[in-house]
Image (tube, grey):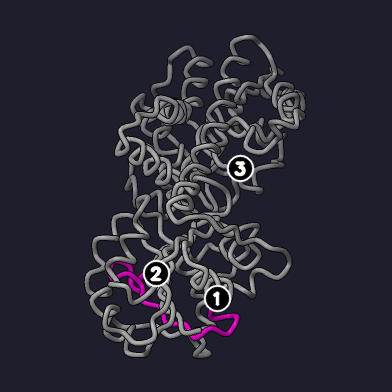
Amino acid sequence: MRVLIHGSELSATAAAAALSWVGHSVTWLPHPDQPWETLRQAEWLVREPGLLERLESALAAGDLRLAADTRDAVSTPQEVVWLSLSPQQRDGLEALFAALVNAEGLRLLVNHSTFPVGETERLEARLGGHARAVALADLIEEGRAWETFTRPSRWLLGCDDTEAEARVRELLRAFNRRQEVIQRMPRRAAELTKLAINGMLATRISYMNEVAGLADSLGVDVEHVRLGMGSDPRIGYEYLYPGCGFGGPNFSRDLMRLADVQSASGRRSALLEQVLDINEHKKETLFRKLWHHLHGRLEGRCVAIWGAAFKPGTARIDQAPVLPLLRALWAQGVRVRLHDPAALPALRQEVGEHPLLETFDGDPLEACRGADALMLVTEWKTYWNPDWARLAEALSERLVLDGRNIYDPAWVSAQGLTYRGIGRRADP
């Protein structure tokens, strides 16, 4: 098929690479805010396993064509238009839609953007009946974009037309061979389902964080509670890991979008508001543990932080727990020595050259030298098995604050270190 992809989101880059890889004739029009020359240097794309290489290979081979502007994009008749835009970019589609209304051959518009519920129907109306519009929920995972597009566990397809469904199935046929992964439902249902999924995941995480806080107060190891809860088949183990808060551009954006949908419908969601409040509160939990351990005497102290990215495998720090944690530490005059293997450029762009911040991207233990305590914020694999003898020697207070519960408290304490996790603790 002849496919025009518009956007510079992660989902747009994955679609451009994958659809051109399987033989479709793909034209890619990045968003003007982030053209290809800028996009190819973006740290989040550089760090996405294999994706940039596949894009450059497809461009070099001619399997993928970059369009200079809207007129160039529709100079060749397109059968499918694939939109991968942020919510803020939906108001900038006038030029593209003006060209598409008069374009020949267009049969399908795929809305792969996180737009408001009902937007797919409005997009179809703007085409004046020239093409059908379907909603395809963006389920691409950062750090696994190629894998989640080419070997999906599911596609949520919002479609009210059998012919449009057939076209989507043909478009994605190469990625739907192992098993049936396309789940069709009405368009508004698919748009709401995407938001509701992340709302449920956030609720599970926040509930588990509340349980971890209660376990702390009662002197209970939350790991026993987690294993007991997960063994109940009605609950399961997924997303029951307590931690120091979640972030990420898509996850956080979807939660706010769901809150907007609730508000616009006149149905205030006290539950969702509480979930968001719990998460923001949890982002400072390591600071509160440090405060308690040092009896509030923090000025002039030095802390090592491992991890800035909102999750392992990405270079992004959007709504990452490290940001409020840094602000809390700096407000008390605490110096920070921070290590992250990927997200330091994004962090420097966000906070600048702060006088209380020193960054490291080599040996994580170098960040611990001269520090009083270590805070584990992002569970990169390079942090899972440190040299405990060197770590104990480096930390003057011998304090490890584990924001992701990746360490065994008994093992850490046996190395002569004080361990404080999320609902877990052990003394040497």
| Residue 68: percent from left, percent from top | 31, 83
Q: Quick check: 37 left or right of 409?
A: left
* Residue for badge 3: 379
Q: In which quarter of the image is residue 105?
A: bottom left
In this rendering, position of residue 92 left or right of residue 54: left
> Quick one: 234 or 376, which is closer to the camera?
234
Task: Please name the amino acid that badge 1 sits on.
Answer: Leu
Kindly identify which numbered label has been placed on residue 39.
Answer: 2
Q: Which mark is residue 304?
A: none
Q: Is mark 3 on a helix, strand or loop?
A: loop
Residue highlighted by disc 1:
171
- Between discs 2 and 1, the one toward the N terminus: 2
- Nearer the observer: mark 1 or 3; the answer is 1
Where is residue 367 shown, x and y percent of the image? 54, 42
Earlier-in-chain disc, 2 versus 3:
2
Q: Is residue 142 visible?
A: no
What residue lies at 29% left-to-right and 60% top-to-bottom?
89
Q: What element carries label 1?
A: helix
